[in-house]
Every structure is written in structure tokens, then in C-alpha cells.
Image: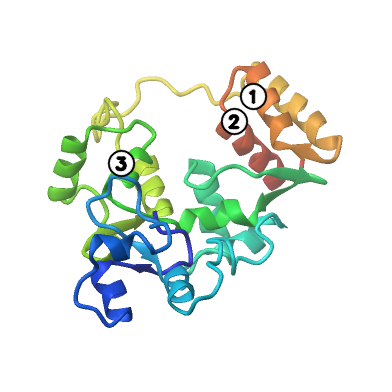
Amino acid sequence: MIPAGRTGLGTADVAKRMNRKTLPPEIRQTLPTPISREGARTTIWDAEQIDAHLAGREIPDLTVGTSSPEELLTADQACRELQGAVSLADFEGYVREGSIPGPDKVIDGVPHWRRSAVLAADDLLDRDEARLELRSPVTSASWGFYINQGRVPDPDITVAGVPHWKRLTIRTWDANRPGPGAGGGRPKGVKETKPRNTAPSPKREARRQRLQSLLAEGEVTSRAISEFADSEGISERTAWRMISELRGTGA
């Protein structure tokens, strides 16, 4: 994985920085730890760490350069941390579908995210890391078939000949791809024979009131929401979606 905001270097790139044609094993062993996953066919290093090594400086941590990683951000602030043009509406949509995790804390009814959790959406994943990011990981063979058939988004970048996808790219694709049984339902053009029951469910309304009472207490932590979801028999994603609905209606 190439952490968000970092630059990856392949073997040829590092050799060029050292004015060498190749990198023999004895030279590789002296270099900083690669950022590519263990077992990856292609080794990738962090550019800043390599430059520090070659200059005889202390090797910087991969989080250096990320200002206040634990700082809490509102949705409006968080969407500006992501690379590319991400609107507030897009960000909130990513949260609803689970492409970006739910808030780390709710303060006075307002969700907040840790900066590091937001930036993780821009981490670059190689082919196998992307596969393991899926909600229901498939086999390597199936994943390769999806890629070859063009069923997966194009890579966001290629580093040292290795395609990489942003974590957000894979999560968003995964959240919106058809699941088992997709394509069912009423055929196009066929009208319903009886009207749908659009009356609110008493059970859901009661749950909504309990959540509203929880929010009224002020600061709500992720743990509190997790416990609420467990007690109600719903997913945390559903709980956060209900919070968004409550905020949207001003309730």
C-alpha cells in the first residue's frame, strides 16, 4: 500500500537516484523498509524515506507531513481533505454507502471524523490489496477476471508498472455494484396491482425516538452508536444513516 499523499518508487527509480543500473541484494538490504505489501512481486519504497536514507538523514515516519492526524473534522472540513474535487454532498453520500467509515465522534449532534481516517480513503492499493478491500472478497482468479473484463474501475495510478486503486475508488465501486440476485423485481413497464403501504413503521418510529433521545444527550461516541446498533439489531451504517436523516429534518 502507498499511504495517501506519499510517492512510491520502484527498483529502477531507486537505482537511478543512486546512479546505479541495478540494485543488488546487498544494496536492497540497506534501504528503508518497502511500503509495498509483504510478498508483492514488485518492491516499492517511499520516495521521502529513500531520499532521507541517501542523504544520511533520519528516516521519517510515513505519517510525517500529515498535520494533526487525530484532529476531528466536520463533514465540510473532511471533504476538503480528500484528493480531487469532492463536494460535501459527495462526501455525505460516501458515508451513507459505507465507502467512508462513519464518524469517530458526534459532538453536539454534529458528526466528526479523525483526519487520519478521512485520508485513508486516498491510500493507494495494489491489485491484491484492492481485492481484500471488498465487503465479500473474491478469489484472486475471479478478481483478475473482473479486471480483465473491464468490470472494475480503471486504476487511479500505475507505480513501477503496478496498477493501484484508491481505497475510495474500490469501496465506492463495491458499494454500488449489483449484488446476488440483482436484476429481479417487477419487470419494466408493469404497474403495481395495489398501492404500497407508505405509512411509517411504528417499530422504526420508536427506534428513531430512542436515537433522537441519545443525540439529545450531547456528545455521542462511535462506541455509543455501536452499542445502540447492537441493542436495536441494526447495522452501524443504518444507525449513522438515521442520524443523517434526523439532522436533515432538523429533528
Residue for badge 2: 236
Q: Nearer the viewer, mark 1 or mark 3?
A: 3
Q: In the displayed structure, would residue 228 be above or below residue 20?
A: above
Query: Is the Cβ of the residue at disc 2 closer than 8 Å to that at disc 3?
Result: no
Q: Secondary structure at mark 2?
A: helix
Q: Residue 228's x, y, as percent?
A: 70, 24
The residue depicted at 56 percent of the width and 62 percent of the height is: 61
Query: Is the Cβ of the residue at disc 1 closer than 8 Å to that at disc 3?
Result: no
Q: Secondary structure at mark 1?
A: helix
Cα–Cα gap, marks 1 and 3: 28 Å
Cα–Cα gap, marks 2 and 3: 23 Å
Q: In the displayed structure, would residue 46 be above or below residue 17?
A: above
Q: Residue 251's x, y, as percent?
A: 77, 40
Q: Mark 1 packing: few (<14 Cα in 10 Å), some, or many (20+)?
A: some
Residue sitting at the far front: 26
The residue depicted at 52 percent of the width and 63 percent of the height is: 82
Residue for badge 3: 131
Query: Is the Cβ of the residue at disc 1 closer than 8 Å to that at disc 2?
Result: yes
Q: Nearer the viewer, mark 2 or mark 3?
A: 3
Look at label 3 and name its amino acid: Arg
Look at label 2 and name its amino acid: Glu
In the image: residue 207, left or right of residue 11: right
Residue for badge 1: 229
Q: Residue 97's x, y, as percent?
A: 48, 42
Cα–Cα gap, marks 1 and 2: 5 Å
Q: In the displayed structure, would residue 192 be above or below residue 26?
A: above
Look at label 1 and name its amino acid: Ala
Q: For residue 157, say whether it is visible.
A: no
In the image: residue 148, left or right of residue 97: left
